[in-house]
Image (cartoon, rainbow, N blue to C red):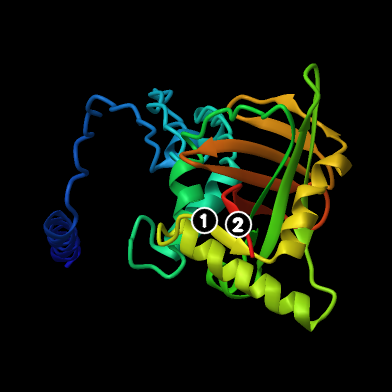
Amino acid sequence: MRIVALLLVVLGLASACGKRSQTTEPPAPPVSPGPVTPAVATPSDSSQAGSPDATAPATVEAAPPVAPPASADASAATPPSTPTAPADPVAALLAELGTAVGCPSPDSPHRTWCIAVDGWASGTLPVLPEGGQAWLGLTVAIASGQPVLDALADKVSLGTLAVRNEGESAVAMITSITPDNDSESQMMAEAVFNLALFFKGRAQTVPIGNDLLGYIRGLPAGASHPVTLGEHGWRFEGEATAEVRRVGDFWVAVETPREGPPGIFVSIYTDRLEGQ
């Protein structure tokens, strides 16, 4: 019985060893590590650049320089522009007058002013007569920024240019003639009408009342503004800075007021006057 029991113990141990060998796998052999690839930082992966590998230092490649936006410093890259000189205000207003009139249209009712518009730039220095002389003409006031056609309808007046040439010096003045009564208003209206016909080439002389003619002939004695030589004409200073040029058979004056709203006075004069 002891022998049988011993055999049973031996057989039981053998059976247990067989079962263990079927369920327990031997441990896996160690895996040799391959080559370690260093971490590379790129502009889009800042976490890798800031966290190097614990086993091997990361190699950080420098990112290419990034150009600033084109508009970031445009003012510094662009050189300052040279300021443009302002246009000649006289030439600009004369151009507006010419556009409103339609120069050089021969059919415009206001074509008288084309004498000044078309001839001012090429006007010449007039010869001042000896002694005293006066001219009668039309004046229009052109205000900067205001409709020129309104000025042609409401701002045309009768005016005179008077010069006294004393040889070594000369004086001049420009005046506007304003009526004091209805009779003078009628006489001046006729003078304006006759001047317009003359400047349009439809008359040889300008008929005016004898009283008006006598008044005009007496004006040179009151002239007081010294005349100086300008680039293209005679200049003198009064309430406005005036320049007078010869344009064909006429005398043209442009005045720039020294005070008040910006603008000019444009005048066309003749001495072809005939009393009646």
Circle 1/circle 2 CB separation < 8 Å = yes
Q: Is residue 152 left or right of residue 200?
A: right
Pointer 1 residue: 205
As drawn, the residue found furthest toward the bottom would be 182
Q: Amino acid at mark 2?
A: Glu
Of labels 1 and 2, earlier in sequence is 1
Q: Along the line of sight, which residue is nearer the eye, 102 or 187?
A: 187
Where 164 sits versus 141, above or below? above
- Counting from the top left corner in percent of width and height, residue 35 is at 24, 24
Pointer 2 residue: 274
Could you tell me if residue 121 is visible in this image?
Answer: yes
- Please rate how many residues cluster around mark 1, counting C-alpha atoms within 10 Å: few if below 14, some from 14 to 19, many from 20: some
- Please rate how many residues cluster around mark 2, counting C-alpha atoms within 10 Å: few if below 14, some from 14 to 19, many from 20: few
Could you tell me if residue 147 is visible in this image?
Answer: no
Where 265 sits versus 100, above or below? above
As drawn, the residue found furthest toward the front would be 276
